[in-house]
Amino acid sequence: MSPKDDAPKDGAAERKSAPAEADARPKRRGLRPSLVIAVCLAVAAGAWILTGDLEDQRTLADGAAGTGRDAASAPASEPAPSPAPAPSPANVPDDKAVAVRVYDSVAEPRRAFIQLTGRTMAERRALLSAETAARVTDVSVELGDEVEEGREVVRLATDDRMAQLREAQALVNQREIEFNAADKLSQKGFQSETNRAQAAAQLEAAQAQLERIRVELSKTTIEAPFDGVVEEQLVEIGDFAAIGTGLIRLVDLDPMLVSVQVSEREIERLQEGAEADVFLLSGQRARGAISRIAPTAEDQTRTFEVEIEIDNADFRLRDGVTASVRLPTRERLAHFLSPAVLTLNDAGQVGVKAVDADDRVVFHPVDILEDTADGMWVTGLPTTLTIISVGQEYVGEGADVRPVQAEDFRETTGPKIDEQPDEMATPPRVSRDDAEPAEAQR
């Protein structure tokens, strides 16, 4: 075969192999738009941060340079003042005690009062009942009548009791004659001692029967056992009263009693004989004295009954009316304080802060005896005491202070707490009226 015949075959082979090689090479892909946007944002953020840091550094450099220029231009004798600390009791100089306002208090005898609610009640009441069976023949009183002791109020029929009385009396007379005769014969020896004793026994039996009839007859008349008022009439004329049947209810209203219940905590503060004020719901007002304090408490309420006795000779006070009672307690030494001076210690006790002889703060717990509109009376304090009236909340127990009386407090020098804690919305300030100049302090 000639070379010309081979040439076309070789060229065709090359053209066939070219597409195969092109398929074997990896294909190139273009960049995705999202990747380009992310790279641009990162570059922009870095540039913005770098720009801010450079500006801050320039500002600091300019400030330092300006401060150096100001310091260089300022006179050497006037150094720049340092900022003063915030005024408060905590930063008072150690060598100067805080001045606190104080006043002297002296205890006085004082009675506190307990306000309780009770009710009036009659001193005594009685139900007059029949002691013998009989018909009612007379009722001499009416409902609400005032009666005196010993007055007849009801009469019962005597029936045959008078006849029994005469019969018993006759028997007694007979027995007396028989006994006298037996006694004379016995003395002369004509009769034995046994017969005499028998006659004496018969006489005593007859006398006992007579006495029994007299007592039975007396029961037909019912009398008032004490002065009082007829509270209830239970029978009318003609009613038959058996033994034990109620006839008249009598109540004693003079004196009138007021009963109240006192708690265990307060019972020891009361004293018999102390005068008490009583205000009745009806509008009446009276004054009485504590007549009885119960020795034992009621099981359910654990309270003690206390009775106040009130004179009621005119019967103007009624039984069973609600009453408000103002009871006085035992007299005790107490201080009169404003509630503003009270404070709490670390244990949560209520008390006052005072100044001792060494000008140190001391805490005294108190018991509130009475709270009034003008102030309160408290116990548990010494008889005389120097009480801190301003600054007690800002000085601790045991701290050294400079006590200044109220009238001299404004004119005092040195650090002091110069505002009332209850008059401020912010903590009190410590004054330095006698503070030294700034150059001397430095």
Image: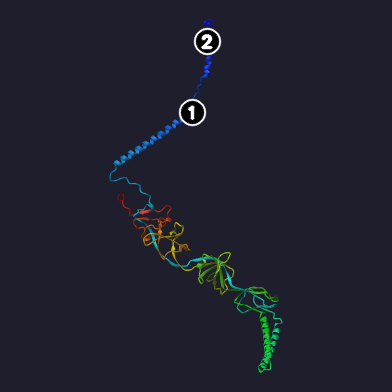
Front residue (pair 298, 66): 298
Task: In the displayed orientation, state which residue is furthest to the bottom.
Answer: 188
The answer to whether residue 59 of the structure is visible from this angle is yes
Question: Does residue 118 appear left or right of residue 98 in this picture?
Answer: right
> Looking at the picture, how far across and down is residue 62, in whole percent?
34, 37
| Res. 280 in view | no
Res. 223 image quadrant: bottom right
| Residue depicted at x 53% and y 7% | 6
The vertical placement of 115 against 62, above or below, is: below
The answer to which of 49 and 197 lies nearer the viewer is 197
- Dot in front, 1 or 2: 2
Q: What is the quadrant of the N terminus in the image?
A: top right
Describe the element under mark 2 as helix, strand or loop.
Answer: helix
Q: Quadrant of residue 182?
A: bottom right
The image shows residue 256, relative to residue 416, as above or below, that is below
Place of residue 384 in the rendered image (x, y in percent of width and height, measured from the top left): 40, 65
- Secondary structure beneath dot 1 equals helix
Query: Which badge, 1 or 2, is on the more N-terminal residue?
Result: 2
Q: Nearer the viewer, residue 438 or 209?
A: 209
Q: Which residue is mark 1?
A: 35
Residue that mark 2 sits on: 10
Identified at 46% across, 29% down, the residue is 39
Measure how far apart labels 1 and 2 are at the Cα level.
Answer: 47 Å
x%, y% of residue 368? 47, 63
Whole-percent x and y of residue 130? 67, 76
Residue at image coords 34%, 39%: 64
**What amino acid is found at the position of numbered circle 1 in the picture?**
Leu
Q: Amino acid at mark 2?
A: Asp
